[in-house]
Image: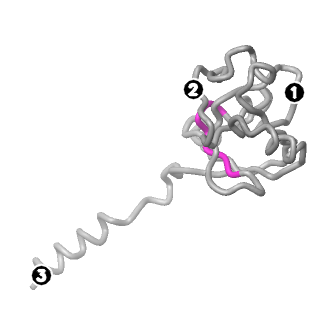
Amino acid sequence: MQIRFLVLFLIVMGCEKSTNETPLEIWDSMTVDASAYNSTPAQTSGKPQFTAFGDSLKPGMKYIAVSRDLLRKGLKHNTPVLIEGFEGVYLVKDKMHRKWRNHIDIYMGKDIDAAIEWGRRTVCIDYKLSKEVIHKATKR
């Protein structure tokens, strides 16, 4: 009987997580200006099928471009992002020209009408912080 109790105790205690561990994921939010873009030569650097990070663009993909100041705030390549007014998770796959600040560009494939209809808005986004950013924040 004591052995069974000891085994059960060890199993239960082994499953408990320490509260001192670094969290696996943390999401943050911010308000940004948002516009839309398409894979057309007029809206890109002349190679509309590739992002500034070298990823391939195909209509239907949930990708965004971010202004370079947002890269420094944790929205790095492949960061998952939730965008107010849109369903699903978008990934940071492109970066914008240096002139933009606090801005995202939502990829809308080749649907220029959808991009024009979206226009420019201020939205709230939620984004997952990288393990590096979490690690640095918990070290302080």
Q: Is residue 32 left or right of residue 131?
A: right
Pair 3/1: label in front: 1
The residues colored magenta run: 76-82
* Whole-number angstrom distance, CA of label 3 to CA of label 1: 68 Å
Residue 118: x and y in percent read 85, 47
Sequence-first tag of 3 and 1: 3
Q: Residue at label 1?
A: 100
Q: Is residue 62 left or right of residue 21?
A: right
Determine which of the numbered discs, if any, sits on residue 2 in the image: 3
Label 3 environment density (alpha carbons within 10 Å; few <14, some 14–19, many ≥20): few
* Whole-number angstrom distance, CA of label 3 to CA of label 2: 61 Å
Pair 1/2: label in front: 2
**Residue 74 appears anywhere in the view:** no
* Whole-number angstrom distance, CA of label 1 to CA of label 2: 22 Å
At mark 3, the secondary structure is: helix
Residue 123, relative to residue 63: is it above or below?
Answer: below
**Residue 51 appears anywhere in the view:** yes
Q: Residue furthest top?
A: 46
Determine which of the numbered discs, if any, sits on residue 56 in the image: 2
Residue 115 lies within the magenta run: no
Residue type of the residue flagged with mark 1:
Trp
